[in-house]
Structures are given as C-alpha cells and as structure tokens.
Amino acid sequence: MSRSILQRRLLDVSERLKRVRAELAVAIEQQNFLEEESEEARLRALVSETPLSDAEAREARRHAEAMTRHRQTLETTLTELLGEQDALLDRMANELSSQP
C-alpha cells in the first residue's frame, strides 16, 4: 500500500477517533444522569406504591439501560479504531524501515 494511502487512512481513523471520543464523553454524562433519574424514580415508586409510579420507574430504567448499551457500543468502536490505528502505524513504520 502506498504511503499516501496509508496517511489518508490514518487521518480518517484519527478523525473518527475524535468523533467517537466526543460522543462517548456525552454518552457517559447522559448515562450518569439517566442512572440518577432511574434511582430517583425507583425510590418514588417505592414510596408512592402506585401503578403509575412503577411504570415511570420501569421506563426510566429502560432509558438508563439503553444508554448503557449505547456507551458500550461506543467503547467497542473506540477499541476497534485504536486497533486499526495501531495496525496502520505499524504498517507505516515497517514500510519506512524497509526503504533503503
């Protein structure tokens, strides 16, 4: 693979890493908020003992769990991108070291 193609792919991976890291930071913040909301809804449901408060607590829990899954997906994507970046850097280093 030519050096310019490697550089372009490396730049692309770098940009994707920036976007995923930013999105992950937001997802973590949102997950923390939703976890707190879920816990508050659960406590309200325990105190009020009404079907409506139970439904609200379940809904809040579902939202928190969905955000947890989204965060985990982003973390997986981040790990994959870091692996791709490492592979591209290794390939670039090998090509540079093999040049006379």
Image (cartoon, helix red, strand yellow):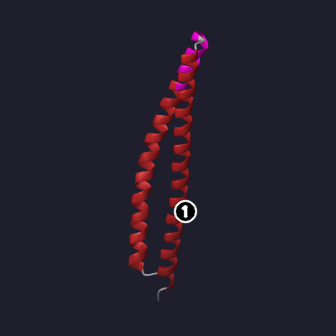
Classify mark 1: helix, strand or loop.
Answer: helix
Viewer-nearest residue: 73 or 1: 73
Q: Residue furthest front?
A: 51
Q: Is residue 46 left or right of residue 26?
A: right
Viewer-nearest residue: 2 or 92: 2
**Which residue shows up at 55% across the image and 62% down it?**
83
**Residue 39 in view (yes/no):** no
Locate residue 59: give its quadrant: top right
The residue indicated by pointer 1 is 83
Q: Residue furthest bottom?
A: 100
Dominant SS of magenta comes to helix
In this view, 92 is above or below 57: below
Coordinates of residue 89 in the picture (x, y in percent) = 49, 70
**Which residue shows up at 56% across the image and 46% down it?**
72
**Which residue shows up at 52% across the image and 39% down it?**
67
Report the label total: 1
Q: Which residues are magenta?
A: 38-48
